[in-house]
Amino acid sequence: MKHIAVIGLGTMGPGIAQRLARGGLVVSAFDMETAQIDKAKAALPLINDVLDKLGIAPKPGGEVRFAASLAEAVKDADLIIENVPERIEVKAEVYRAIDRLIGAETLVVSDTSGIPISKLQEHLSNPERFCGMHWSNPPHIIPMIEVISGAKTAPETAKAIVDLIESLGLLPVVINKDVAGFVENRILYALLREAIDLVEEGVIAPEALDTCVSWGIGYKLSVIGPMALLDVAGLDIYHSVASFLNQELSTRADIAPFITKRVQEKRLGLKTGSGVYAYTPERGKELAAERARKLVAVRRALEEKDGK
């Protein structure tokens, strides 16, 4: 692959585009909102600075070009990465528009966080050329990418995406079944459900919970994965504790009032200045820089562990 189109330049799009460009690929980036294109352009220098700190040297020929239209973005593209909002109807509209502009040989993937691929691929004329390519946020820092085949995805399509990821020096994780949320977000949302429940029930304050997770299980899990952790702890210990603790864990199927109330009040997090915590614009920028610096340091440490 030489030319990739990235459609949708919200939270993930700029990082994906620039990481691909670092790999020597020509990237055509497009968003229907001019404001998003402007934000993406402003974000690229910061993303490049982080990539420099990670020691990811640019391969020759790579660049990010901002297209003026969808047609311009997908013209002659070998691969199209859809990264628009997480609503099937929005994605389906984009696929129908793309379908009229590309040939049968063009690959299309979605960076959806969890919509089943089998549902999305029904909106393309060549569903066998479609699969999931789920990056983790921030995509230019976190190297793991999930690859998910839908019911009609051809094996060679998924293989081509795995090969692309490996050629960039990133880590493809093949998901064997097309389940909602795939794997990363199923694990994350199970953790978040329990965390929100504990805070809402007054068991622990939000700040204390963040400390508990980051410096407890989070610290361990970055080095020892959950399945390996079972062996470290001992399956007999897990069996004993799970026999009573599993009955106590949150199993709610709705969304906790802790979240619903804040959404109704438009307290959505960093983007609105408040959510669980409150943020000034200056503090938001400081946190972004601080977290990027720490994620870079953690990644470098993990790569050293793996002998890279």
Image: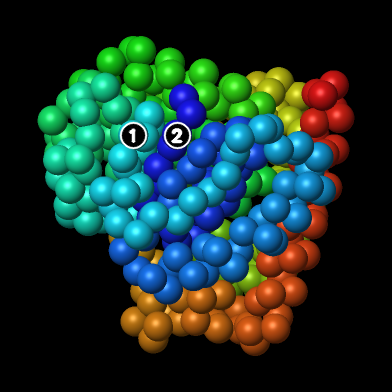
Query: Is 217 placed above or below 119 here?
Result: below
**Earlier sequence position, callout 2 versus callout 1:** 2
Please state the horizontal and vertical placement of residue 126, each as a whole percent of the image.
18, 26
| Residue under the point 34% across and 82% down | 264
Query: Is 64 placed above or below 104 here?
Result: below
Label 1: state its secondary structure: loop
The answer to whether one can see residue 143 in this image is no
Q: Are marks 2 and 1 in contact (CB under 8 Å)?
A: yes
| Residue under the point 32% across and 28% down | 107
What numbered label is drawn on residue 3?
Answer: 2
Residue type, mark 1 in image? Asp
Please state the horizontal and vertical placement of residue 1, each as a whole percent of the image.
46, 25
Please state the horizontal and vertical placement of residue 179, each as a whole percent of the image.
33, 33
Please state the horizontal and vertical placement of residue 286, each as a whole percent of the image.
74, 74
Could you tell me which quadrant the C terminus lies in?
top right
Query: Tag 1: Cα neighbours inside 10 Å, few (<14), some, or many (≥20)?
Result: some
Whole-angstrom CA distance, mark 2 to mark 1, is: 7 Å
Which residue corresponds to mark 1?
A: 76
Residue 47 falls in image quadrant = bottom right
Residue type, mark 2 in image? His
Q: Residue 101 or 266: which is nearer the viewer?
A: 101
